[in-house]
Amino acid sequence: MATFTAELALDPDAVVNAVTRDGDAVAIRFMDGGVEKEERFDYLVAATGRRPNVDTLGLETTRLALDNRGAPAFDRFTMQCGDSHVFVAGDANGDIPLLHEAADQGRIAGDNAAGPTSGPGCGVRRWRSCSPTPTSRASAGPSPR
C-alpha cells in the first residue's frame, strides 16, 4: 500500500463530504482526523462498493448476529444465518455483489430453506466458462456441457 500511495492519493476509509468540478480539476471535501479538508485532483477514481440492502428489515430486533454493516452473519455455503430459520442471499448479504452470484445464492438459500442444509449439492454453484476470443469479442456464460 505504501508503494501505491507514494504515487497516488488513496484513502479507502475516507469520509467524503462533497465532490465538485472546479474548472479542469475535481475538488474533494473530506474529513481527516476530525477536520474537514479540501484538495483538488486531475482525476478521481471512485470505487464505492455496495451495501447490503437490509436497512428497513428491522434485523436489530432479532437474535441474529449482525456485522458492522447491519447485515446478518451467515454461512456462505448454505446462506443460513446461524442456526435460525433465516436465509440471506444477493444484495441482502453483500457478499459478492454480482447478478449471477445473487442468482446462485437465491437458489442455494431456497433449496436449503426447503430441505437439509448439509450433504451433497449444498452450496454448489453453476459452472461457468469464459472463452478467449479476439479483442473485439468476448464469450462468457454457462458451459455448453
Image (tube, rainbow, N blue to C red):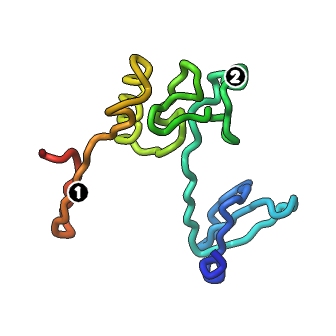
Residue 133 quadrant: bottom left
Choose between 108 and 11: the one closer to the eye: 108
Residue shown at 42% from the left, 29% from the top: 118
Q: Is residue 80 above or below residue 26?
A: above
Name the disc covering residue 130, or none: 1
Q: Residue furthest front?
A: 119
Which marked residue is nearer to the observer: mark 1 or mark 2?
Answer: 2
User: x%, y% of residue 73?
Assistant: 61, 35
Residue 83 drawn at (x, y percent)? 58, 24
Q: Amino acid at mark 1?
A: Cys
Q: Which structural element holds mark 2?
A: loop
The quarter of the picture where residue 93 lies is top right
- The three-letter code of the residue at mark 2 reads Arg
**In the figure, residue 113 lies in which quadrant?**
top left
Q: Name the residue located 33 percent from the left edge and 32 percent from the top edge.
A: 120
Query: Which quadrant does the C terminus fall into?
Result: top left
Query: x, y (%) of residue 11?
Result: 68, 66
Q: In the rendered view, does 140 fall on the left or right side of 123?
A: left
Residue depicted at x 52% and y 36%: 75
In the picture shown, does residue 72 fall above or below 51? Answer: above
In the rendered image, which residue does mark 2 sit on? 63
- Relative to 1, is 31 on the left or the right? right
The CA span between labels 1 and 2 is 42 Å
